[in-house]
Amino acid sequence: MIGNPAELICRATLFDEDDCADRRVLAEYHADRQIEVVDRWEEQVANIRRLLPAPDPQLLAESKRWAFYPWRRTLVSILGPRGFRALRLDRNRNLITAAEQDRLAGLQIGVVGLSVGHAIAYTLAAEGLCGGIRLADFDILELSNLNRVPATVLDLGLNKAIVAARRIAELDPYLPVVVETSGLSADTMAGFLNGLDVVVEECDSLDMKARVREAARARRIPVLMATGDRGLVDVERYDLEPSRHILHGLLGDIDVDELSGLSSRDKVPHVLRVLDATRLSARSAASMVEIDETLSTWPQLAGGVALGAPAVAEAVRRIGLGEPLRSGRVRIDVADALDHLAEPEAHTDACRAAEPCTEYVEPPASSDLLGIVAAAASRAPSGGNSQPWLIETDMDSVTIRLAGERTTTMDVDFRASAVAVGAAWFNARVAAASYGMLGPVELREPDDSSPLSAVVRLAEGSDHDLARLYRPMLLRESNRHLGVPLPLDVERAAALSAAAAAEGARLRLLTEKDDIEQIAAIVAATDRIRYLTPKLHADMLSEIRWHADDFSDSGIDVRSLEMDQSELAGIQIARRPDVMKMLAEWGAGTALGNYSHDRLCASSGVGVVSISGQALSDYARGGAALEAVWITAQHLGLAVHPISPVFLFARTDDELQQLSPALAAPLRRLQCDFRDVTRTTADDVHVLMLRFSYAPSTSVRSRRRTLAVVSD
């Protein structure tokens, strides 16, 4: 079989322009007026230079090659072997990754029977699922074959294996293709099968089907088959089950030699068992009755033949990559599928969420001071709008207790919750001061009821600086519009820093474009980690309220994300855990950080609030400072957008490991980069980051749980 002269008329001859001998032959071909020359090499070079990521320089340095097709008398310029493969298969990514493509290139596949097998062999070559193909068929192409074989009248009279091999050579002249034009026999079977990784069997003869399987089983080679009727796909994993009965045991105990001696009529019961007559389509079953009466042979359609090719290709891909694929059979029935057409949903979830709905109305203000102060506390910001607090009142005080049951993965040791409690505490102080009733205030460390409590006592007392923030405090909101990065003037910057300092914290304000872009890149990378870490991804999705009928009194209304239609469509994909799992496996998903990256780059400034001390009470003081900065910024006409990098509340390597076990190392590097850009040290405890810009009003305000004040 190897070196069969038939191969000379179905294989391209390759030439290298850097080879002296090849250049002489090429000169002769170029001078021959009977040879057509197709030279689009420069176009191919331009296309390969545009690949993402940029190709290896060594790949670009490959010399120009030529492929001569004697049956066409045509000379075609092509890239070198590595460049040709990279460019031709580029559009496979990431349905098949580059690494997977390299693994699959090690496969050797044999296809027996090149009527149905033609489409399969071509698909395997087109998808780059192997590094070599062997084709076997003794038959010639006839006009009656052109109802299903993707050939032309120019191919009539040629061996079917030659026809398929030529077509594959014109697709990829570098792919080795071996042909056996005498079909398979006892003499050629071993030579054809030895060294193969997969056999695709598409013979017409039942006894040849059996012989191929017996020989493949002896060599532990899996066998695949597809038939056109109702999309039958058959898998026999002899590599995993070397003692498995051929054809799933459907032939019974009959010996293969005995089978070959049966007449066509006597083979019918065995054929029907193999094909499962009860599951044949009505047209195929009825046609069997007419064979040798009004039909000369078994009918097949091009569509059915074509359907088998992608199914077999998927099976080969799974075998080659070691993915799950067991022995058995399945039907991919197009006709049945078309009988079950259904109307698609009119809108995706995100699009529905973006439509107008009943607007949230703030509850009426309380008439008593305790209620007013408690309501002000409840308007504080919190991660994911989780509102991790329980508000209690007694005769003369309001107490805000940290509700640990509302924690999330990023809320390491309740630090984010403590920040929220501190912000609520600040709001309560502002409300009390506005009524001239700001008494003693305190933060209490853990007790039996809560890890942290913040208390505001009502007694005669005033604080003008706090009191003037009451109305701005009630109007404070998260504004996630893209915004316009107009310069942040010195007066506003000073006011923001003073607001943080008044609460014992520091504000590191970044206004230089380079600093902001570095922060944007860091946060985008942490967002990618958030999406690709299952528990962080689940937490994030649980925060978002998607539907008009799901706008509850906590969480983030999807409309408040201020996404455009393209971003809303993209988040539908980003919601899927299976997609995130795949991106994680590929080491991909950079675009998952685009939302934060684009908004940060459109900022007038980025502020990082930090404190000294690591107790929950310290984080609460930081939360009070955060709220003071936020209220002040919005009062000065700035749009404020809170951003929490994944690492924000992690203090140790172990805590980073708990956040994202698979991506803790890059998370640690990003945390260090963040400190470098913000010029903060390990002693600076980060509370939150705020981006400032100039933007239109928000589309919707965040809701709050109905205030159920607990009174002592």
Image (tube, rainbow, N blue to C red):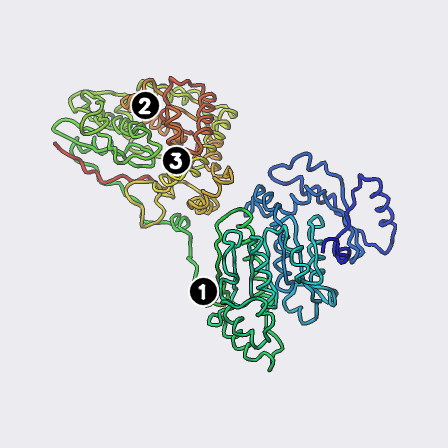
Discs 2/1, front = 1
Can residue 484 be seen here? The reply is: no
| Residue in view at x 25 percent, y 35 percent | 405
In the picture, the quarter occupied by the C terminus is top left
Task: Pick whichever, 582 or 6, lies toward us.
Answer: 6
What x and y, as percent, mark residue 9? 77, 57
Q: Earlier in the sequence, mark 2 or mark 1?
A: 1
Q: Is 566 rendered above or below residue 681?
A: below
Give the camera-side residue of 141 and 657: 141
Image position, residue 230 (x, y; %): 51, 67
Q: Which disc, if any, is residue 622?
A: 2
The residue tagged 3 is: 479
Q: Is residue 33 left or right of residue 344?
A: right
Per the image, the residue denoted by label 1 is 341
Residue 706 sits in quarter: top left
The residue carrying pointer 3 sits among few (fewer than 14), some (14 to 19) or many (20 or more) residues within 10 Å by Cα, namely: many
| Kind of residue at badge 2 | Gly
Secondary structure, mark 3, is loop
Inspect this view and state whether residue 135 appears. yes
Q: Nearer the viewer, mark 3 or mark 1?
A: 1
Sequence order check, earlier mark of 3 and 1: 1
Q: Quarter of the image for the N terminus: give it.
A: bottom right
Query: In 3D space, how far apart are the residues under numbered discs 2 and 3 (Cα atoms)?
Result: 21 Å
- Residue type at mark 1? Leu
